[in-house]
Amino acid sequence: METSNRVLDALLKEFELPHVEERVPRDVFYQLGLKFPQQYAIAARDVAACVKRAEAVGAGPFLHVTIPAPNWVERGELLKDCKLEVALGYAGDRQVEFLGPGEGTKHYARELVDADYVFHHVGIYQNGMSEIAPRLEAAGHPEVVRGGIKLGSALSFDFRYFDSREALGIYLEIQDFTYFSRELSIEPFLRGFAKIKTALPI
């Protein structure tokens, strides 16, 4: 499949992965009351190696960090000292995320038992988690992970994974980010980082 997003096409070809709509018809998201996914998320044994391959075909630059995952609740159990290795960047207008096996959780590692990397989930940035979550559960996609932080009404990061693998072959992740009750986008920050990184001497 070829699209107008040539960088994304090249990245997916490099990793032999499908476009979202090749895996899940667009109508499925709309029927669930969801936006079309803005993020491709790939679990990987070696995130740094994947970043190099992605940047070689024109994606990125990537912000590559290991961060704590506060309030990580997996299948109803709070997991302490959970850390995630994450690399975020863009392929055209689509966000690409590489995720390492992680520490304190097996959410990504269990998908890597027989592979070096896999199309793990699609990420959807959308406000209204209190309505979205019950709707997805009722559709047969149970919540398996939730996390985030909340600083009163000033700032809220609420992300949740829903197990839609049986129906869709991948997880769904909903990311509800708000700033003073308004939708907060992390795209300007990531785009700004990319400009700075590109300008720096190698």
Image (cartoon, rainbow, N blue to C red):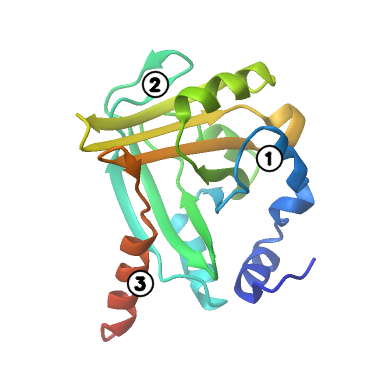
| Residue nearer the viewer, 194 or 38 | 38
The mark lying in front, picked from 2 and 1, is: 1
> Residue 109's x, y, as percent?
51, 36
How crowded is the residue under tag 2: few (<14 C-alpha within 10 Å), some, or many (20+)?
some
Quadrant location of the N terminus in the rendered image: bottom right
Residue highlighted by disc 2: 73
How crowded is the residue under tag 3: few (<14 C-alpha within 10 Å), some, or many (20+)?
some
**Residue name at image x 47 percent, y 70 percent:** 52
> Residue 83's x, y, as percent?
32, 37
Corner quadrant of residue 147: top left
> Residue 186's x, y, as percent?
36, 54
Q: CA distance from mark 2 to mark 1?
A: 25 Å
Disc 1 to disc 3: CB gap under 8 Å: no
Q: Earlier in the sequence, mark 2 or mark 1?
A: 1
**Residue name at image x 73 percent, y 70 percent:** 3
Q: Does dot 3 land on a helix, a strand or a loop? A: helix
**Residue name at image x 34 percent, y 63 percent:** 188
| Residue 148 shows in this picture | yes
| Residue nearer the viewer, 89 or 14 | 89
Q: Earlier in the sequence, mark 2 or mark 3?
A: 2
Q: Earlier in the sequence, mark 1 or mark 3?
A: 1
Residue highlighted by disc 3: 194
Residue highlighted by disc 1: 29
For residue 141, side relative to residue 67 (left or right): right
